Amino acid sequence: MLNIEEFADSSELFDGHYALIRPLSVDGATADVWLALDTNTVTEEVQLSDIARLNDDEIEKLGLMVAIKIYRPQNALDIEGEQRFRDEYMIVFNCHHTNLIHPTHFSIFKETPYLVLPYCKLGSSELLIGNELGDENIWKYINDVASGLAYLHALTPPIIHQDIKPANILLDDTLHYAITDFGISSQKGGVHGFYYDEENSGTLAYMAPERFQEGTEPIPQSDIWAFGATLCEILTGKVPFGEEGGKNQIESNAAMPVIPNVSSDIQRLIHACLSKEPGDRPSAKQIKMSAEAKQYPIKSKKYLFGILNVIAILSIFSALYFFFKPETKQEAPQLSNEELYEKALNMIASDNKETFSTGINLMDSLSKTDYLPAIYEMAFSYGCYSNPESKRRKRLLGFNYEEPSGKPKENYELSFVLSQKIISHKDSSRYPLIEADAHYRIGVYYCYVDTTGGKAKETLDHWKTAYKWALQSKNDSVINEIRYEIERLQDEVKN
């Protein structure tokens, strides 16, 4: 069997035309990945000794640079390793998608199987870990990876990757994130038993709870859990449930991780992906749709606009009908508060300023009738919220909501007044999530806006009350966010 390190130091070309430059990854259990120059694409005379002295940019000018995945035997039969490489090549041979890295060649050199893949010089998404990405970049990442997974999972039979993690998602030359390393992938209902053994089952930290159950075959939902763990690590710097992944999630009954500095939609999406039960996780297609809409769960604006257009057309015909037949004209039935609220909410969802303004005015009128959900929506539209949807509303209202410091400039006073109104409302107990939010916002006001000082106790009292209401709402995202703020403030007070 070939000793690849010794071979790379020699002056020989790998399989006759690949000049090995340096290892890109040596962490795999069964293979190493090497950067190489395909000398078949080189048009001028060049010696291996000359290539060794060049940097990557200079080598790239000579010809095509590729990544070669070379089998490294490690406690496995050579025939099994060879079959694994053949299977990996065959599994993705007919898979053509922007967000998949497609092997271009498979062969065996000196009894060593290898695959040739495109070289992604921008590296893997491991480079994103610990960086502040911003919601736009996060949604872009989610959309790209979910698109690749949706394609794989929609095939007949579905292809299950089984090792989704930051290292196996690369940024290609077109700035798309693409999934690579199908070495332990399987087609649902496949026949190769070694796909399911513990040694070759993937990376523990990204393995879903069901994958620790004996006899469980690969399912698409396990890739979704791994994707949730991948997103969590990129955004927090840590995998969500430690190095044993889903096993720890089951045994310790650990709470969902808090994902700071991202929108609530992104946090809700990650938590959904990390659900213990496979059936509670969104599909890759649903994740892709959420990324396109930048919200989770998705509320399709197209459908809302379609409904409004139908209503408008019907209204015109109704008006014409009653114009020509005045004797049959009757008063339109009065809409209930719930119906008016839904109508206003749909109009506020529009980016058309006229439609949006009409919706806001309708919601304001409804709030003055003491309808609690409408009061909350007015607080959300005008108040101290940095949620992207609240910012969108304030932008349409004409607020300059960004200060030079980068922090939101919002109407904290109005938010405080409306929050006080909510918690004193006779119906507040019917809406635990709204009640939790109102107490949280009052705490925010005392913590960040009221400059009289000595408000830490008032802030903590309101946040603890908010936490109790959040528990009643059973909304994990809100529960974790409020708990995080309470612990942070308690630590500040101690220090």
Image (spheres, grey):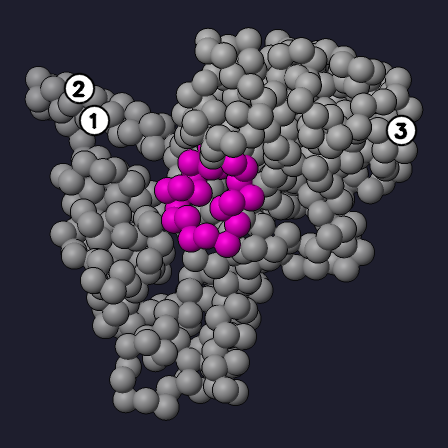
Q: Callout 3, which amino acid?
A: Ala
129 in the magenta segment: yes
- Residue 290, placed above or below residue 13: below
Label 1, on which residue? 312
Question: Measuring 76% from the left and 25% from the top, which residue is drawn there?
Answer: 71
Span shown in magenta: 123-144
Q: Callout 1, which amino acid?
A: Ala
Tell me the mark number nearer the camera, choosing from 1 and 3. 3
Q: Quadrant of residue 423?
A: bottom left
Question: Measuring 50% from the left and 63% from the top, which residue is drawn there?
Answer: 481
Q: Callout 2, which amino acid?
A: Phe
Question: Measuring 24% from the left and 49% from the top, which residue is drawn there?
Answer: 393
- Residue 253, placed above or below residue 141: below
Tell me the mark number nearer the camera, choosing from 2 and 1. 1
Label 3, on which residue? 76
Badge 2: few (under 14), some or many (20 or more) residues near its Cα, within 10 Å? few
- Residue 409, placed above or below residue 11: below
Q: Earlier in the sequence, mark 2 or mark 1?
A: 1
- Camera-side residue of 26 and 252: 26
